[in-house]
Image (tube, helix red, strand yellow):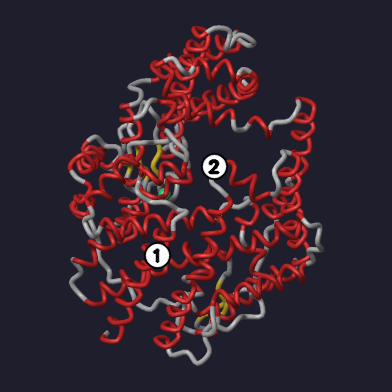
Amino acid sequence: MKREDIALNDTWDLSLLYVNSQQFEQDLTQAQTLLNTIIQQQGHLCDTLDHFKSYLRQDEQLDRLLSKLYCFAHLLCDVEPNNAQGQTMLAQVMSLYQQAQEKLTFVELELMDHETMILDYLKDPHLENYQYKMHTLFRQKEHILSKEMEDILAKVNQIANTGEDVFDALRLEFEPVEVHGKMEFLNQATLNQFLKNEDPRVRKEAYEHFFKEYQRYENVFASTLSSTMKKDAFFASMRHFDHALQASLFQDDVPESLFFKILDMANRQYRPLFHRYNAFKKKYLQLENMYNYDLSVPLVKEKEHHYTIDECFDIILKTVEVFGSEYVNIIQKAKNERWIDYYPCVGKRDGAYSSGCYDSVPYILTNFIGDYHSLSTLIHELGHSVHTYLSNAYQAPHNASYRIFVAEVPSTLNELLLMQYMLDHASSKQEKAYLLYTLLEECVGLIFRQPMFADFEYRLHTMAEKNQPMSSKIITDLYLKLNQDYYGPDVKMSPYVGCSCYYVPHFYYNYYVYKYTLGMTIALALAERILKKDQQQIDRYLSFLKSGGSMSNLDLLKKAGVDPLDDQLYQDAYHYFETTLSQLEDMMKEV
Ligand SMILES: [Zn+2]
């Protein structure tokens, strides 16, 4: 479809940001002026309380202007990549961003140097709500090195990422797969399709052809992976951390005990539930030998149904009724005020996101095609948008933006509540079974598979920190062993499982995957409680949505009524999984 053929009501309204290009230009000029003003104050930011206040004001204005300019330009370019004016605007704002980044490096150092003075300034009642922002800055202090050392580290950094760069640059080619007598193209996307094929031979061939290539380059991947682990260990120790895990968790402001708790719960305590699911699959699929590449065969097929946008909103509004009128009204506003760009069109960006800034509505981009996935994506993105909307409404600009660590909770929770609504209103057993199956599959990836990845990553980092040898044999043997324990007694391992670790990009991100597990665990536990209409829990959750980024991640979550260091959270989350599995087991007996 071409963009001009889409009804105006089904596109987002960017005139809420700027009505014409003159307004954009004006803000751009004002941002440039502000940047220059701040630069001129180098060395004097903290001279007096008034100096400091005026710096904070200018910094906030600059930040808001830049975000607003960027928001407009990137949204415009994402739906109209051939709009030359949009591209110019985007280039202008990116160049200003870069300028600000380069020229304002002195700010953080200058503020850190005046910690005692600033702590005194913060006693001023007008500055009270800057406590958390400043605390976040000051806690970095002991990990910042001398100017000379920082310069060296910056130079080392330019050559330290070769491992990841090589991993990204390698493009493997795979032997085709025979399907119904025809040779079919194999790549990452088609692999996932082949693994769902009903013919076991196709699944086996696709899996083997794919990972055979990784095996062929195993020594290259062992080097890229081990050099990345060594790089993480090096930077951690240079910045006075005990190890890479500590350095990574420091950025999220969470204790190491949280990481180990997640691993313990998922990989030990609740893993038998995953094994039970695998045993059920084996029985239901009637496979004498079930291999790891057989687990994606759909147990239940989707019932075709087409949803219109209005139908989606009817369902979504009923799903979120439990959160009360304030929440419901925001969703209605999203539809009525045209926050959403729904349909795919030529050149439009793929996928979906929620994006906005303090001075905009939280816009949503989707590629709506009317299936269940479209509906689920819409409620997911609306979860992000309501979170942003409430954060902006209730917090000052410097406390509004929340971090990735907590961001996926409201969106995933909405998906889970939608699933429950659909289950309650499903008209056939097949439809119900499909929803339960979809939920279980989504959970497995996040609450069982990712923690196994995290364990593997931890062991690799430990090897690097202890200067132990990291040959491909050592790495793949370790990965095979972890996978055997992970899948359990009912799943046989392909000989290529060991090498499949070389395909996962997340091992290059220094402890990222545990965040996926935590996000899903919290969403499951909240869903479990909210579905029981626990009003106190609902109120706490809403106050979390209104808190933006005004406190640490752990404090935010505690505000929501969930403590990730408490076993109860995991008990609630995995219980949700267990109940869903029992329901599916019962239902499939009858289908
Ligand atoms: Zn999301």
Q: Return the x and y of residue 380 as percentages of the image width and height.
A: 35, 51
Mark 2 = which residue?
A: 253
Mark 1 = which residue?
A: 571
Position of 336 with respect to 65 (left or right) is left
Looking at the image, can residue 75 be seen?
yes
Q: Return the x and y of residue 497 as percentages of the image width and height.
A: 64, 74
Position of 16 with respect to 556 (left or right) is left
Residue occupying image coordinates x 42% and y 19%: 24
Looking at the image, can residue 85 be seen?
no
Are discs 1 and 2 less than 8 Å apart at CB? no
Ligand 1 has an atom within 8 Å of the beta carbon of the residue at disc 2: no
- Whichever of callouts 1 and 2 sits on the residue coming sooner in the sequence is 2
How many numbered marks, from 0 up? 2
Task: For the C terminus, give its image quadrant.
Answer: bottom left
| Amino acid type at mark 2 | Asp
| Amino acid type at mark 1 | Gln
Indicate whether 543 appears above or below 291: above
Give the alpha-carbon distance from disc 1 to disc 2, as whole Å.
24 Å
Q: Return the x and y of residue 242 as percentages of the image width and height.
A: 71, 47
Indicate whether 1 appears above or below 175: above
Q: Return the x and y of residue 183 as percentages of the image width and height.
A: 57, 77
Residue occupying image coordinates x 78% and y 59%: 223
Residue occupying image coordinates x 35% and y 53%: 377
Q: Nearer the viewer, residue 23 or 34?
A: 34
* Residue 151, picture quadrant: top right
Residue occupying image coordinates x 44% and y 80%: 276
Q: Nearer the viewer, residue 16 or 402?
A: 402
